[in-house]
Image (spheres, rainbow, N blue to C red):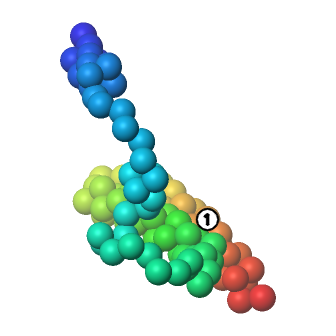
Amino acid sequence: MASFLPLSVLLASRLLAPRNPTAAKQDPYECGITSSQEPPERFPVRFFLVGMIFIVFDVEIIFMYPWAVTFREIGLFGLVAMLIFSFAVFESFSLYHRQWSS
């Protein structure tokens, strides 16, 4: 039931929308200025990898917050579990760093 309205709106938009594809509409948008030359190079994959590392550490912090709130109740088991989790994250980061450095 909850998916009926979004799907019907998408279908109506698809059926009722005008279709006039032109070359200008197919070009990527670049601040309204027509590009005078091709870009010098593509972004290296390293930027993507840095973003992925940021997300991994961000998720680790998300998991650490509830652990820190309930630390006294979960005791030693929670500490060991978080140490194992943190070790796995930092070990993968060190492997990535060694690979990136070489």
Q: Is residue 54 left or right of residue 12?
A: right
Callout 1 crowding tier (Cα within 10 Å): few <14, some 14–19, many ≥20: few
Q: Mark 1 sits on what residue?
A: 88
Decide which of 28, 55 is in the foreground and name it. 28
Picture coordinates of residue 94, whole percent (x, y): 65, 79
Image location (x, y in percent) of residue 79: 45, 63
Q: Residue furthest top?
A: 1
Q: Quadrant of the C terminus?
A: bottom right
Q: Residue furthest right?
A: 102
Residue at the (30%, 31%) spot, across then down: 18
Pick the residue in front: 62 or 70: 62
Q: Height in image: 13 above or below 89?
A: above
Q: Residue at x 43, y 61 (%)?
A: 28
Residue 72 vs residue 26, the one in the foreground: 26
12 or 83: nearer the viewer:
12
Q: Position of residue 14 (x, y in %)?
A: 33, 25
Disc 1 marks a residue whose amino acid type is: Ala
The answer to which quarter of the image holds residue 100 is bottom right
Q: Is residue 99 left or right of residue 73?
A: right
Task: Residue at 61% x, 65% y: name it.
Answer: 88
| Residue 59 appears in the rendering | no
Query: x%, y% of residue 95?
Result: 71, 76
Quarter holding the N terminus is top left
